[in-house]
Image: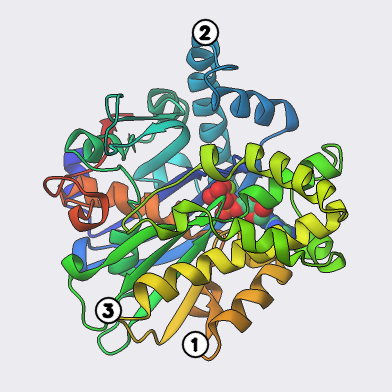
Amino acid sequence: MKSFCKLLKKQTKKVIGLMSGTSADGVDVALVEIRGHGLSTQIELITFDTFPFDAEIRTRIFNLFHPETSRVDEICEMNFLIGELFAQASLTLVERAQLCTDDIDLIGSHGQTIYHLPPQEGMLHIPSTLQIGEPAVIAHRTGIPTIADFRVADVAAGGQGAPIVPYVDFLLFRRADETIALQNIGGISNVTLIPAGANARDVIASDTGPGNMIIDALVEIVTDGTQRYDPSGQFAAQGKICESLLTEWLRHPFLAIKPPKTTGREVFGAQFARQALKQGEAAGVSPFDVIATITEFTAQTIFDYYDRFLLPNHCIHTIYISGGGVHNMTLMQRLKSLFHPIPLRSIDSDGMPSDAKEAVAFAILANEAVHANPTNLPQVTGASLPKVLGKFVPA
Ligand SMILES: Nc1ncnc2c1ncn2[C@@H]1O[C@H](COP(=O)(O)OP(=O)(O)O)[C@@H](O)[C@H]1O
Ligand SMILES: [Mg+2]
């Protein structure tokens, strides 16, 4: 049996990272060769793919997001089913890489977040978070030791449990003489700012607001569910921006909240999209105009965060974009002009495929857990102390 202790002595490990984000579009799987750990970490991405969830699974996942449609028997079953899908995706990727599971040392799985109740001022709830995709199923099916449930230790220590990728951003992308920002545009958008010559304590990170989430929800309504997202931003490009709606949405209170802050589906999800369509109808503009205006809103919320909270104190050399948002050309074009003259590049230009970055991060977080390195950044999550993140399941 492969043991975690044996992994401590291995200089180079083959590790799989598994991720499904707030968009619940599919399982991202990255197979990475990792050399060293901590500040000495070096990686080579062997292969990556996304395995989209079929429509039925996606509907079942979305039902789990809402207390009104979520049932305890369904959560129980979906935990195992998603574990199974994550395992199958891993096995397929290993086969495609012409390797066998014995060649793989470790899996790091984020799972699928279905509910997130971070600490908040005046809260009535117990801070908590729930990612499903049972790691015991992943470890059993693949025969590979698995580390999962990375967020809970941070929440237990008083943190938001998010974001947890900034530590990995720091390991992989820090520069001695350039301040850079890494902007991930998934369902929600978040930024990691790494000042020139920073150590981990200097890293700043926060959600900036919506990513693709409102756009996706609008497109699903407008196309009667035949499309899940705006392909390359074509729909937005066909519409006209409605200035009055844009101005109104830009008054959203989330934008003024001081960072670090997190947001989600409850604020910038389907509800927002339905309301936007109603407002569009009242203003006499077409659904495509609403998509164009929401796309502009999304771009402006990202810029607004930098404008308020980062640019007054930091001279940013380059902004690197990752996540599914890079495929929305209309969004990317608008971001480029808003940020001009700061160059905006896809993270691909730095050798990391933009869709693979988050899955790679969970491979690295698993490797760090094996070496007992803390991977939350307390200044980012608000946790009371650095924590080793992840729970271990032997194969
Ligand atoms: N070809 C494309 N054109 C436009 N948008 C795309 C395209 N491919 C993916 N996306 C967007 O990327 C999203 C998925 O991005 P991802 O980074 O996986 O987000 P998450 O981490 O929330 O799952 C999709 O829901 C969609 O909005
Ligand atoms: Mg995704």
Q: Secondary structure at mark 2?
A: helix
Q: How packed is label 1: few (under 14 Cα within 10 Å), some, or many (20 or more)? A: some
Q: Contact, CB < 8 Å: mark 2 with mark 3?
A: no
Question: In this rendering, is residue 268 above or below 145?
Answer: below
Q: Position of residue 42 (x, y in %)?
A: 31, 69
Quadrant of the rendered image containing residue 246? bottom right
Q: Which residue is mark 1?
A: 342
Which residue: 22% across, 36% down? 153
Q: Residue at x 45, y 40 (%)?
A: 101
Q: Which secondary structure, mark 3?
A: loop
Residue type at tag 3: Pro
Nearer to us in this view, 80 or 227: 227
In the image, residue 128 above or below residue 214: above
Instruction: Please state which amino acid type lies under the numbered disc 2.
Output: Asp
Q: Is residue 247 left or right of residue 105?
A: right
Numbered mark located on residue 111 in the image: none
Residue position for label 3: 195
Nearer-N-terminus badge (1/3): 3
Which one is closest to the eye, mark 2 or mark 3? 3
Give the mark, 2 or 1, whose residue is nearer the N terminus: 2
